[in-house]
Each structure stands twice: as structure tokens, then as C-alpha cells.
Amino acid sequence: MFIGHFGAGLAGKKAGKNISLGTLFMAVQWLDLVWPLLVLFNIEIVKINPGDTNMTPLNFESYPYSHSLLYTLIWGVLFGTVYFLFKRNLRNSVILGLLVLSHWVLDLFVHRPDLPLYPGSALQGFGLWNYPFIEIPFEFAIFIIGIILYLTSTKAKDKIGVYAFWGLIVFLFGVHIMNLTGPPPPDTKTIVFAGLSMWLLVLWGYWVDRHREQCTM
């Protein structure tokens, strides 16, 4: 799941109109922003195993602290709490906490059983990555719905608000296509670098939102 998570972030703008798109992206991708650091320090383990599923060569062997349901709930509470301490907006804090949780829920649909409920528990996953004819339309639908909800919630203040937004959408779509059709990564360091580079998409979200404003309707 890649653009599906970003679709959830875009959709979040409808509910949390005062939340920057960068913050929404950070929330929906928080588990995957934490995960590469844990892999880097050998706290969690991923292996490259082409054929592990029909859609990804990555074997998520162990990631209880970034991707178990228990820790996802903890991360969601912490994320919402930190936002509340800065913004004093309980509603938006709850929305962001739920968006953190949305990552695990969406992953549950696509992953094979590799998601723990808590460290050491039985592993969960419905395995749609083994059924591309279902997973691909499912994920694209989330992304398209997110785009529509974001566009009905905001309007561009200037040309940057138009071009930066659509540039972001095209870039996300392109990365997703490369993930589906490209060769497997050569090593774990490449995976870590790619994961950490997603912070740039968070910054891109902040840039887009600075040049857009809420729709009055």
C-alpha cells in the first residue's frame, strides 16, 4: 500500500480543514516514517524476497514496534497528543490519531499475514497483494477519492497551488507505478533510504497547502 495511504491523507482534509496536508501526510505515513529507522538500527527486520507476494518483493519479517496494532494505537495517541499540545484543537488531534491508525487498517487488507496485533502475537493480513486485480483498483479508488475530497475542500490561492498539487499527484502516481513494475531493491540500505525520503513528500504537502485555502462552500 503506497498511494492508498496518501489518498487517506488527502481525504483527511475534508474532516480536518485546518490541518495542513503535510501534517495529514505525516499522520497516515507515520508507521512507515518510523519503520526505516528501526530497520537501520536492526530493531526490526525486512528481507528482499522476490515472489514473497505477487506485488512486492519485501518480506516484512519483524516489525512489532512500528506495525503492530498495539504500537499503532500508541503512536496514534502520541501523535494526536503532540498536535494538541501545539494547536489546542481536540477534534483535529483525534482526526490525526485516527489517520495514524488508518495505516494499519489499510495494510491489513493488502499484506499477507505479517502484521502482529502486539509483539509476539499471531500475525494478521488479508493478502490482497497476492490478488493484483483486486488490490490495484482498491488502492487507486482510495487515492482518487482522496483527491476529490481534497479538491472539494480547498482551492488554489495562486498558480503554485495548482501546479504544486498536481505535480505531487503525478509524482505519487509515478512512484506507485515504479513500485509495481520496477525491479526489486538491491539491498536493505536502499529500502531504508527510500523510506526516509518520504519525509520529502511530507514537506511537499506543507508546500502545497501554503498555496491553497479552504473552500467557502
Image: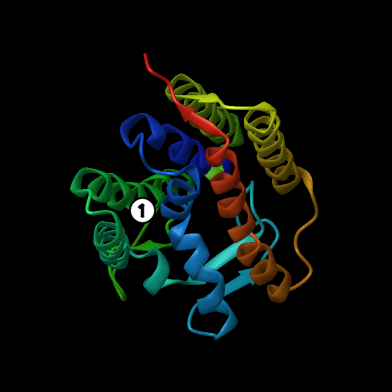
Q: Position of residue 127 (x, y in %)?
A: 47, 47
Q: Is residue 149 left or right of residue 48?
A: left
Quarter in which the C terminus is drawn: top left
Q: Position of residue 55 (x, y in %)?
A: 64, 47
Secondary structure, mark 1, is: helix
Q: What color scheme is it?
A: rainbow
Q: Position of residue 40 (x, y in %)?
A: 59, 81
- Furthest-left residue in this view: 90
Residue at 63% of width from left, 33% of height from top?
Answer: 165
Residue at 67% of width from left, 36% of height from top?
Answer: 164
- Furthest-front residue in this view: 158
Residue at 38% of width from left, 53% of height from top?
Answer: 104
Q: Where is 43 relative to 121, above or below? A: below
Q: Is residue 146 left or right of residue 116?
A: right
Q: Position of residue 68 (x, y in %)?
A: 34, 65
Q: In the image, what residue type sits under mark 1?
A: Val
**Disc 1 designates what residue?**
100
Q: Nearer the viewer, residue 38 or 196?
A: 196
Q: Where is 209 relative to 31, above or below? A: above
